[in-house]
Image (cartoon, coloured by chain):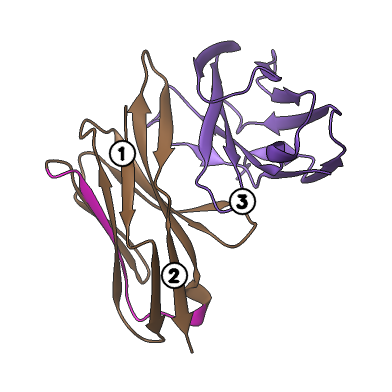
Chain colours: A brown, B purple
Amino acid sequence: KQEVTQIPAALSVPEGENLVLNCSFTDSAIYNLQWFRQDPGKGLTSLLLIQSSQREQTSGRLNASLDKSSGRSTLYIAASQPGDSATYLCAAPFNSGGSNYKLTFGKGTLLTVNP
Amino acid sequence: AAGVIQSPRHLIKEKRETATLKCYPIPRHDTVYWYQQGPGQDPQFLISFYEKMQSDKGSIPDRFSAQQFSDYHSELNMSSLELGDSALYFCASSSSSGANVLTFGAGSRLTVL
């Protein structure tokens, strides 16, 4: 069984600050790891996907790293903006048999960027 | 590029009624997943289908059932609705021949009154 933990549960920062969101997972035999953004009451927007063979992925001001051996991933947001305010979810796959991989989500980090 | 299409986007039902949610996966994706996200909760896995057969089952109530059809679209049927069934229901699809990357739909919001 895969368990995903995200720290902190909530984070409030002033605009322009760089920040790091943390994610840990128990089953290190993962195929990949995804970071999602979710605005209140809205759907899941995939931000970054890191394959198990990669150590990091970058998209604009976002950088995600993956350390399988320690069971950790981080999402780094540079020069934060009020528009970055949302819940950020980390999700790791769990192979329950055969070719089926289901995602297990962390409880998310609620980020608030204050103008 | 085509995404995962879910319908309806919003649905309001009374207690004890029945609701059906539909999901149309990305073309050539053979696996469909259903997730339920209650208010303030993380998405919880309900059930998945691979090549029209149920492949895995999570915390899906007995009142719920689902199937995947020959065109790979999937439907989640919910009966005897309870207030606690009010949630966002997400469908995701993936290809077993790809990198097993799940792509999520925008979700269907069910409100039970």
Which residue is at a point 25% across and 52% down the rendered structure image?
Answer: A73
Q: Is residue B58 above or below residue B44?
A: above
Of the residues shown, which amino acid type is indicated by label 1? Asn
Marks 2, 1 in one chain: yes
Tell me the element at label 1. strand
Marks 2, 3 in one chain: no
In reply to whether residue A78 is colored magenta, the answer given is yes
- The extreme bottom residue here reads A115
Q: Tell me the residue that label 2 is attached to.
A: A111
Tell me the element at label 2. strand
Which residue is at a point 56% across and 41% down the rendered structure image?
Answer: B104
Q: Is residue B18 above or below residue B7?
A: above
Magenta segment range?
A: A70-82
Q: Tell me the residue that label 3 is attached to.
A: B39
**Residue A83 location (% of width, % of height):** 52, 76
Q: Are marks 2 and 1 in contact (CB under 8 Å)?
A: no
Of badges 3 and 1, nearer the viewer stands: 3
Q: Which chain contains the residue that carries disc 3?
A: B
**Residue B52 location (% of width, % of height):** 61, 12
Q: In the figure, residue A30 lies in which quadrant?
A: top left
Of the residues shown, which amino acid type is indicated by label 2? Leu
Quarter occupied by the C terminus of chain B:
top right
Q: In the figure, residue B21 lies in which quadrant?
A: top right
In reply to whether residue A57 is colored magenta, the answer given is no
